[in-house]
Amino acid sequence: MSVHRLCVFCGASMPADPRFREGATLLGTSIGKAGLELVYGGGRVGLMGIVADAALAAGAPVIGVIPHDLNDREIGHPGLTRLVVVDDMQDRKRQMFALSDAVAVLPGGLGTLDEAFEALTLRQLHYNNKPIVLVDIDGFWAPLVALIDHLIAQGFVMPDARALFRVVGRIEDVVPACFPEGAGSLAATP
């Protein structure tokens, strides 16, 4: 039986809104319950640490990918199944994306935006066809979706760009949106 990996991009900061923390916990738990593996940024802080701890507690293998300078500053999560230490943030994104079968984007800051836009751009350019899901807890991603719609309206982005990603408002919808045929239907990632 093959196991599939869900990459989660999310913030390394601890948000004030408890709904974001609850969402990260629920997503990590649902990854474990679905028999998936989690791939994420390797940190022990913020939403990253919450989603990793919840996935581990639910029995999911967790692969973290972190640049050596962040790991050296003791931000790396010490309890992961596997921690991949890379040279820089570009290597981190490349590794996280290569190790995963789908991407879910929880709330986060500039780094999360960078990761999400790179994944969208790679999909737009047909470098892959991995599902990308924005987890819109309490409307967090609505301004981003409005910006993309604005870019489309202004002619900077093709109208089919809205088909590059899905938006879900409930954590329960993330795994089915990422793996619509079921987690066992995709070819395993090495």
Image: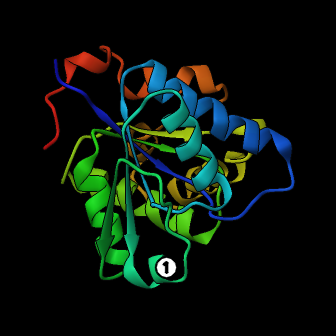
Towards the viewer: 190 or 44: 44
In the rendering, at what x and y percent does residue 154 appear?
Answer: 54, 61
Circle 1 residues within 10 Å: few <14, some 14–19, many ≥20: some
Single out the residue that lies furthest toward the top.
181
70 relative to 101 in the view: left or right? right
In the rendering, at what x and y percent does residue 41 appear?
Answer: 45, 60
In the rendering, at what x and y percent does residue 84 appear?
Answer: 30, 64
165 relative to 93 in the view: left or right? right
Quadrant housing residue 18? top right
- How is the model colour-coded? rainbow
Q: Answer whether residue 39 is visible to the viewer in this image.
A: yes
188 relative to 121 in the view: left or right? left
In the rendering, at what x and y percent does residue 57 appear?
Answer: 54, 32
Tell me which amino acid carries mark 1: Leu
Element at label 1: helix
Towards the viewer: 139 or 186: 186
Q: Residue at x 32, y 57 (%)?
A: 96
How many numbered marks appear? 1
Q: Answer whether residue 167 is visible to the viewer in this image.
A: no
Considering only vertical position in the picture, is 78 above or below 52?
below
Considering only vertical position in the picture, is 81 above or below 65?
above
Q: Quadrant of the C terminus?
A: top left
Considering only vertical position in the picture, is 109 above or below 185?
below
Which residue, given by chain and number where applicable, does mark 1 sit on? 70
Q: Residue at x 56, y 28 (%)?
A: 29
22 relative to 18 in the view: left or right? left
Q: Residue at x 67, y 47 (%)?
A: 141
